[in-house]
Image (cartoon, rainbow, N blue to C red):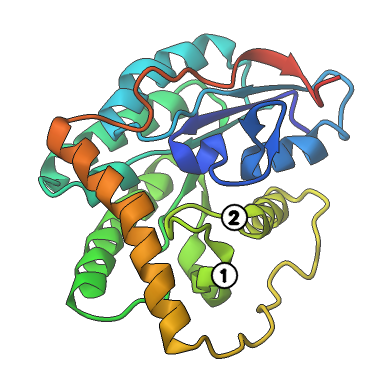
Amino acid sequence: MSYQRFIALGDSFTEGMTDEVIDGNYRGWADRVADILTLQTSEFTYVNLAVRGKLVKQVTEDQVPQAIPLITGKETLLSFHAGANDVLRPNYRPENVFPIYNEAVRKLAATGATLMLFTVLERTGNTGKTADMWAERFSTFNKNVRSIAAEVGAIIVDANEEKFLSDRRLLAFDRLHLNPLGHDRVAQGVLEVLGMPFDPNWRLPLPAAKPTPWLVKKATSTAWFITFALPWIWRRIRGKSSGDGRSAKYPNPTTWPLS
């Protein structure tokens, strides 16, 4: 099936952080998918409403109403990924997040669009009590995603089915967002799920990593804490978000690729 339009909703994952920057915007997996979808039909347009740092309530209230009038039926591919930022918050309550997420999914599914949902990677190679806590949180979140996807008949892209995706070399320096290689792997997985042309080698594990000297690990971790963790904590304390004041990169149907 070819798609006349691709509308992408969500947070930093779908905005494209931290892929290569093109014309002032992160490229990201969604742009990479659009690169292939546009080859299937001359009438293709692309919309990306995702903004970094947004919580599920913000995505639901801000992006969903913008997306619905742009949907033209099953030939519109609609991706929805939200909630990971909620899970990361200290005051996270699944009983508050899940109903908002599920209501948005049902509303989007009712439009007749081809709806695509994502699970969140539960582990990225870390161990210990903190890693176990995040894994448990994301596991519960993912169960809800799978459940609502089955209810509405949505396509689901399950990150946890591919073990190699937990390789931290697919992450950027902030240890949270995908790097260019990570975004490309996700894009190829999405294209395969959609039945589109894809790189058959996308599942190949990365070559074995060379051991990193202890001193280098320590210096890298210290730099990460100063440049990423501390600013993130400071934003949380002040109730701020990395997405404050930012707008979507492609809020209107855009002929793709950009000329």
- Residue at 72% x, 67% y is 202
In-front residue for pair 139/194:
139
The quarter of the picture where residue 78 lies is top right
The quarter of the picture where residue 28 lies is top right
The amino acid beneath tag 1 is Arg
Q: Position of residue 177 (x, y in %)?
A: 48, 52
In-front residue for pair 90/83:
90
- Residue at 54% x, 54% y is 178
Image height of 7 relative to 12, above or below:
above
Image height of 77 relative to 210, above or below:
above
Query: In this rendering, does residue 115 appear at all?
Result: no
- Residue at 53% x, 39% y is 14
Q: In this figure, which residue is indicated by the disc labeled 2?
A: 179
Image quarter where the C terminus lies is: top right
Mark 2 secondary-structure assignment? loop
Q: Position of residue 128 (x, y in %)?
A: 23, 80
In-front residue for pair 250/240:
240
The amino acid beneath tag 2 is Asn
Image quarter where the N terminus lies is: top right
Q: In this figure, which residue is indicated by the disc labeled 1?
A: 169
Image height of 122 relative to 8, above or below:
below
Q: Position of residue 169 (x, y in %)?
A: 57, 70
Mark 1 and mark 2 lie on one chain; the one further toward the N terminus is 1
Left or right, 228 with respect to 70, comes to left
